[in-house]
Image (cartoon, rainbow, N blue to C red):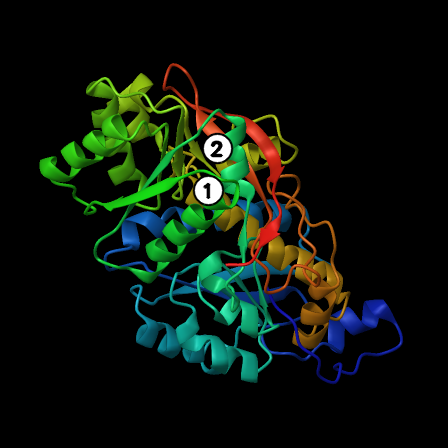
Amino acid sequence: MLLCLASLAACSSSPATSAATGCNDPGVSKNEVRVGLIYPDTGALATTFLPVRSGLNARLGAINESGGVNGRQIHYSWSDDRGRVDTNAVASRDRVENEKDFAVIEATPVSSGGADYLATNNVPVVGIAVEPAWSKYRNMFTYSLSRNASTSSEAVTTFGRYAQEKGGTRALVVGDPAGLSISDGIAQQMRSSLQSVGIPTLSTSADESPTDAQIREIIRLISTNNVDILASPLTIETFSRIVATVRQAGVQPKVVLSGGQPPGADLLATYGPLLAGLTTYAVQPPDSSAPGAAAYRAAMIRFAPELQDRGQSVAVIGYILGDMIIEGLKAAGPCPTRARFISGLRAVKNYTAGGLIPSVDFEHDFGKVSLCYPFSAVNATGTGETTIDPNFCGERIAG
């Protein structure tokens, strides 16, 4: 998620001496690199994003215990943007001008607030890409670009192909009548993808606290239109309730696709087998056999014991973002500068965060909607997740 060229900070001819005395970019000292985290610690999104810190603590804790990167420990402090664009702008400036951070982690859906300022100052940024800024500024790095973040109308066949391979023939996409831009973009991505493979697609809406009438209408539409694919960008809490109620009514879609995070232990305990087959595509479930999953679990146990439900995808995202900071510092060499971090990480190909995500080429994939996703589903007993395909891909289509 980032890039930029500037003159490289002068370093002595000896790498060891350079690391010790010649690295003068903000946030870099002989033994430490300081980064800033911006996320919504308060406000409507706080509960959703809180686990990101546990994942970040785990990844940075593990690398620091092993000696850091080129002998430097990576430490972070955080700012609360409350999920507001204007507050994000203030927080971004504070991280650079007052905290003197080397890089910034934007674990927030409103990173556009400070994007222009951070780009102007050549500050490396890694984060969650749900806004067009992630396709505009080359100092910003992400591992997966959503349709919302693309500056083009490009979509992909991936979700339609997946539903088709699972036997789906007609779809219903349940959107959010509040018209939030993030969920609207995901809903449109789902519709475009389904229609691109010839699947007729209906649309309806439900509130984040859906009324009984809204759920009855969903059941009616599924029953009267022979719908066998139910998809939605609503939060996983809301969509889980809808799915469970639909199934209690005797309606059994073949494919249930969520644009949100996987259901956590609390939702599985509440609904159990009623959520069987509910599919998500954000990240690999950390209890899978995927490469890197064991390292994730071990780091979480050791460095983030406060999070009991370690399967939360937001925690995995925090872990991945921490890993991207590590990857950028490795690419920057023994005398890290912001410019070297940006140019070095941009040149990285086949990045998988240790096997937790499909391969990313930070240069080739810049500004493009992701083609490949790790699909996972709730198991038959409703007690956990299973990986369906760690790297399911489609093709690009014009929107």
Q: Position of residue 2 (x, y in %)?
A: 61, 68
Q: Position of residue 119 (x, y in %)?
A: 55, 79
Look at 65% across and 72% down and name the residue there.
3
Q: Which mark is residue 308?
A: none
Name the foreground residue: 253 vs 106: 253
Please identify the residue farthest to the top as the structure is shown: 381
Q: Does residue 159 appear left or right of residue 354 in this picture?
A: left
Determine which residue is flagged by label 2. Answer: 163
Mark 1 and 2 residues: CB-CB less than 8 Å, in contact? yes
Q: Position of residue 24 (x, y in %)?
A: 68, 80
What's the residue type where badge 2 is placed?
Ala
- Give above or below for 221 relative to 73: above
- Give above or below for 89 relative to 132: below
What's the residue type where badge 1 is placed?
Leu
Mark 1 element type? helix
Name the foreground residue: 85 vs 74: 85
Look at 44% across and 65% down and name the residue there.
131
Please identify the residue farthest to the right as the structure is shown: 13
- Position of the N terminus, as image quadrant, is bottom right
Number of other residues with Cα within 10 Å of mark 2, as a class: few under 14, some 14 to 19, many 20 or more:
many
Determine which residue is flagged by label 1. Answer: 194
Q: CA distance from mark 1 to mark 2?
A: 8 Å
Which quarter of the figure has residue 46? bottom left
